[in-house]
Image (tube, helix red, strand yellow):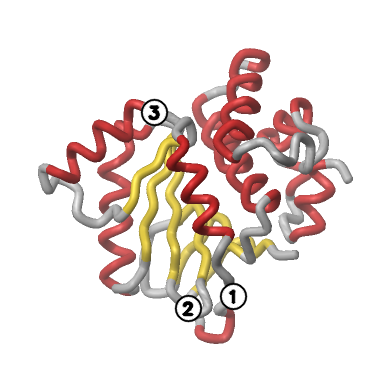
Amino acid sequence: MKLTQYFISQGKLNASNSKALRLIEKVCPNLNDNKNLRPSMFINNIFDEIENKFKPSNALRGSVFEHLMMCVFFRNNIGPFYYQVNLNFVYNVTFDFVLFDTNKKPIILSLKTSGKEAYKQVELESLVAKQVHKNCRTIYITYEDDAVRFLERKKSLSEIHNIDEIYSTQDKDFDKLIDDLKSRDYINPGSIDIVKTGIFLSD
């Protein structure tokens, strides 16, 4: 099944309109190509090839990065999950991804291609999330490798309080994160009205 069709079958009904997904499909037509490739290598190989071949704009780069993360979720059977999420009682914030474990604990993932520039926004969004969902787990994922060292130093200086974990997709620690996420079971919290809006994707 072509990549775009797979996304549609999982619930992303507007997938055929996604420029990011079309670019990914040109490089990786089938979701399960190179199935044994580590998640970090899967993302970085495709992202680099798209950058070199198609020179996407900054906005399109961000969308490509997010869709590659969804591919990693699907390839590793991580789900169900929400994409582009507004949570009830967390106002004026759209989270990139949210998963809910079987205890209904939100796991919030924020993705940025440029980690150094956007961390203050992610820190603020994490703070707002924790004010409502005190037990939530907040994870910041960036494409930049050197951003992790910069951000971990900010944490050690107590300039970052609310981002729990920081990863670069170019680092093996990202693969450990994916291993951790795929070892867990997730639910659709539906009836408890946690999610206000968001695209729900599931097998």
Of the image marks 1 and 3, the number of the one nearer the N terminus: 3
- Is 70 on the left or on the right of 15, as rendered? left
Residue shown at the point (26%, 53%) measured from the top left: 124
Q: Secondary structure at mark 1?
A: loop
Residue 19 drawn above or below residue 132? above
Residue 187 circle label:
1
Q: Secondary structure at mark 3?
A: loop
Place of residue 121 in the rendered image (x, y in percent of width and height, measured from the top left): 30, 46
Question: Disc 2 marks which residue?
Answer: 104
Crowd class of label 1 (few under 14; some 14 to 19; many from 20; radius 10 Å): some
Closer-to-camera residue (9/44): 44
Q: Quadrant of the C terminus?
A: bottom right
Q: Secondary structure at mark 2?
A: loop
Question: Disc 3 marks which residue?
Answer: 145
Residue 189 drawn above or below residue 154? below
- Tell whether label 1 touches label 2 (CB within 8 Å): yes
Residue shown at the point (63%, 34%) measured from the top left: 42
How many numbered marks does the figure carry? 3
Place of residue 103 in the rendered image (x, y in percent of width and height, measured from the top left): 47, 80
The CA span between labels 1 and 3 is 32 Å
The CA span between labels 2 and 1 is 7 Å
- Residue type at mark 1 is Ile
- Is 111 on the left or on the right of 138, as rendered? right
Place of residue 120 in the rendered image (x, y in percent of width and height, measured from the top left): 25, 43
- Residue type at mark 3 is Asp
Place of residue 23 in the rendered image (x, y in percent of width and height, measured from the top left): 71, 29
- Residue type at mark 2 is Lys
Residue shown at the point (67%, 45%) measured from the top left: 71
- Which of label 2 and label 3 is nearer to you? 3
